[in-house]
Image (spheres, rainbow, N blue to C red):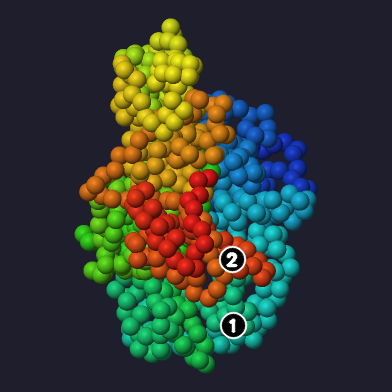
């Protein structure tokens, strides 16, 4: 276990102005607080916070972070309190320890809803001060190093949580070395057989390739020195988990992998990086498609480097990373490399220009957008796990996106309004579909149309969480607007029927009686069928009694006008009653502003007498008045709506109908039927044929789209005239 003076010496190596008294006080306090507590390994518990502090000294972090690491388990596991730590060590350290205590209580591999909410709390805890995350990552790293002392069932859960949450977070913060070690340690416990197999193969390959690696290092140094470049070259092999993921992703065997060993070339400045690249590429052939310039376009976690792969000595593929010392420090320490020490002070301030920290703040800002915890978790995990491509706006703004992103993702990355109103795009000056996959360096220009609503189908196409969340919100808002529009029409007509004046102010005053918080809530609820219009009128006018208007009672005698037996087909206008058109809701079709659908197995077309049935959560279902399905709603009068056709002559639409045909079973019959429908400008949506055995006839049911009833009758009459057709009738479901 680390001694008190060793902790102070570690910090003073990189920060001579460290507060020695503060570090000593924290060491003594934590030692007394943890007392005789033991870890699962049998070691004193105090060894754990000291190891966490040691990891953070390697990242060269400030005194407050080191002290918080020493104290990070005191509130959770001892009698210590936040107030006591604030009093002894100051509010800053108290806040860090308190944030770590809250994180420790979170279960991040529970059921999805709980996991999502806990992940939300995790990001909130680290948003104010990212040093909380740095201590937590160091805490997790030491726990993973000693995970073999933990019971197997708990071991698997911790390993899964590390792979799912903490390793990607370390990578997103630019701490690549820590990410790789966390992944490898978790892999060892999560899939021990796979880890053992890959590790064994790597060891065998290292023994076999040892001389070749040294030869490549010598030849690289020789070439660089010959051109007057000072550089250091370090060879390293990839870790087992990285190898395993690559084998899975590319579906290849271990023997087929060609870049298991990589080499890092460290030079003095950026110009030297590109000079090295030129020397390497003129000495050995480069592998096409394997060059990446992360210096001119850094990753969002601040990573900068040149990557290339060449066919080097012995025809061996060699993967090279070329960077400066500063770039290498950022690549290793990530966000921790941005710690700036104030002159004469002992505090550290995280550099606000850190792109990784910008990502963290932006991610936390999405908490305010009202998404559910599950959507927030999905959004964040998508950003954590995807590699990136870099694209540009026409004005040169760099947009980083996950690999596989589309122009739709790009539009939402620029701004939510740009995504919602996107209707087309150009990539590198050429018009391409919005579903196209973007590549590094693409310049993307989005065409917009004000008032456009994104199609719900986009949600399954995009790959970024931000785009998915925005599409969901826009779709929900559009559907809610439709329901609210329908609800307003239903309510206004209900007030007209009851001869009561409709007033939004009076309706707002009645909101408590309807258990709704806003006028739009009431309108949408009526449109969805959750509240009946009569109940709304009663809430505004408690004395209202709904009475259906009817004509004079028929004279039951043999004589008299109303006794005519053949009057069923006549339409009467009752004196003093307004026309039904004044009280009915206009219906245009499936693409209007109201949530409307047509009855299955039959549909309805202009010219039919129609009625609307309000279906909860679905809007209006339109039935022809003769449909036998309407008998199912005889005992639900509140769901019946007066509707009428409102056809826009300047923008005609097709409507669904279904016809049943009995036709002769011979070759060419179906072709003749389809020919007639096509010649008469009808559109076949679906077709089914039934009837088996040696029967001479087949039953054909066709869903056809027509302009109106006259158009439908013309098609049916043409079908009847064909010799192969025995019978044609319209289906009303």
Residue 370 visible at all: no
Q: Residue at x 67, y 38 (%)?
A: 31
* Residue 327 spot, x, y in % from top left: 39, 64
Give whichever of 208, 675 is nearer the camera: 675
Residue corresponding to mark 1: 256
* Residue 468 spot, x, y in % from top left: 44, 50
**Sequence-earlier tag: 1 or 2:** 1
Q: Residue at x 44, y 19 (%)?
A: 559
Up-down relation of residue 240 to residue 38 (above or below): below
Up-down relation of residue 137 to residue 74 (above or below): below
Give whichever of 715, 337 is nearer the camera: 715
* Residue 197 spot, x, y in % from top left: 71, 73
Q: Residue at x 63, y 79 (%)?
A: 254
* Residue 306 spot, x, y in % from top left: 38, 72
Q: In the picture provided, is 601 more to the left or to the right than 241? A: left
Q: Quadrant of residue 646?
A: top left
Residue corresponding to mark 2: 697
Give whichever of 500, 157 is nearer the camera: 500
> Residue 244's mark?
none
User: SS of the residue at dot 1?
Assistant: helix
User: SS of the residue at dot 2?
Assistant: strand
């Amino acid at each position: 276990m680390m001694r008190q003076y060793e902790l102070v010496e570690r910090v003073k190596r990189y920060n001579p102005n460290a507060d020695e008294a503060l570090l000593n006080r924290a060491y003594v306090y934590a030692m007394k607080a943890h007392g005789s507590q033991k870890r699962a390994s049998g070691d004193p518990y105090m060894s754990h916070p000291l190891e966490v502090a040691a990891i953070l000294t390697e990242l060269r972090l400030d005194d407050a972070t080191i002290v918080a690491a020493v104290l990070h388990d005191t509130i959770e596991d001892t009698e210590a309190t936040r107030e006591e730590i604030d009093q002894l060590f100051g509010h800053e350290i108290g806040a860090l320890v308190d944030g770590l205590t809250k994180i420790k209580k979170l279960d991040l591999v529970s059921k999805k809803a709980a996991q999502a909410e806990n992940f939300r709390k995790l990001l909130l805890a680290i948003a104010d001060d990212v040093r909380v995350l740095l201590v937590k990552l160091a805490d997790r790293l030491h726990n993973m190093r000693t995970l073999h002392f933990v019971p197997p069932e708990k071991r698997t859960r911790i390993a899964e949580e590390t792979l799912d949450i903490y390793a990607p977070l370390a990578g997103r913060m630019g701490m690549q070395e820590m990410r790789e070690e966390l992944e490898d340690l978790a892999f060892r416990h999560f899939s021990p057989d796979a880890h053992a197999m890959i590790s064994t193969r790597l060891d065998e390959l290292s023994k076999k390739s040892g001389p070749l690696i040294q030869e490549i290092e010598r030849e690289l140094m020789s070439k660089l020195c010959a051109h007057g470049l000072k550089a250091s070259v370090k060879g390293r092999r990839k870790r087992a988990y990285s190898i395993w993921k690559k084998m899975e992703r590319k579906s290849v065997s271990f023997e087929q992998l060609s870049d298991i060993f990589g080499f890092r070339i460290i030079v003095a400045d950026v110009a030297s990086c590109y000079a090295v690249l030129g020397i390497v590429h003129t000495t050995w052939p480069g592998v096409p498609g394997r060059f990446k310039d992360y210096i001119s376009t850094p990753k969002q976690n601040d990573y900068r480097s040149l990557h290339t792969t060449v066919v080097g000595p012995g025809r061996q593929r060699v993967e090279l990373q070329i960077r400066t010392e500063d770039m290498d420090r950022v690549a290793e320490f990530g966000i921790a490399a941005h710690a700036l020490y104030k002159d004469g002070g002992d505090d550290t301030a995280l550099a606000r220009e850190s792109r990784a920290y910008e990502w963290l703040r932006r991610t936390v800002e999405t908490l305010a957008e009202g998404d559910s915890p599950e959507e927030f978790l999905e959004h964040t995990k998508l950003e954590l796990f995807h590699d990136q491509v870099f694209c540009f706006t026409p004005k040169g703004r760099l947009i980083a996106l996950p690999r596989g992103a589309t122009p739709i993702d790009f539009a939402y990355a620029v701004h939510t309004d740009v995504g919602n109103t996107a209707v087309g795009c150009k990539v590198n000056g050429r018009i391409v579909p919005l579903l196209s996959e973007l590549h590094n360096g693409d310049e993307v220009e989005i065409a917009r149309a004000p008032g456009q609503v994104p199609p719900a189908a986009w949600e399954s196409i995009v790959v970024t969480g931000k785009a998915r969340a925005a599409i969901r919100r826009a779709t929900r808002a559009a559907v809610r607007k439709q329901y609210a529009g329908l609800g307003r029409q239903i309510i206004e007509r209900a007030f007209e029927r009851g001869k009561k004046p409709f007033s939004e102010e009076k309706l707002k005053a009645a909101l408590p009686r309807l258990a709704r918080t806003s006028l739009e809530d009431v309108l949408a609820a009526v449109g969805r069928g959750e509240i009946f219009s009569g109940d709304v009128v009663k809430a505004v006018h408690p004395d209202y009694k709904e009475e259906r208007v009817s004509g004079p009672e028929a004279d039951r005698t043999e004589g008299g006008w109303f006794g005519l037996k053949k009057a069923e087909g006549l339409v009467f206008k009752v004196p003093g009653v307004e026309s039904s058109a004044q009280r009915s809701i206009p219906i245009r079709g499936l693409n209007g502003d109201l949530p409307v659908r047509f009855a299955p197995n039959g549909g309805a077309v202009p010219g039919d007498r129609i009625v609307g049935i309000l279906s909860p959560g679905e809007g209006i279902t339109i039935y022809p008045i003769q449909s036998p399905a309407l008998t199912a709603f005889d005992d639900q009068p509140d769901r019946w709506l007066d509707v009428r056709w409102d056809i826009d002559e300047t923008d005609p639409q097709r409507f669904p109908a279904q016809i049943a045909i009995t036709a002769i079973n011979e070759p060419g019959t179906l072709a003749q039927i389809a020919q007639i429908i096509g010649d008469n400008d009808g559109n076949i949506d679906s077709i089914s044929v039934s009837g088996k055995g040696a029967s001479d006839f087949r039953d054909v049911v066709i869903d056809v789209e027509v302009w109106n009833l006259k158009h439908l009758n013309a098609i049916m009459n043409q079908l009847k005239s064909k010799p192969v057709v025995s019978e044609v009738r319209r289906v009303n479901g």
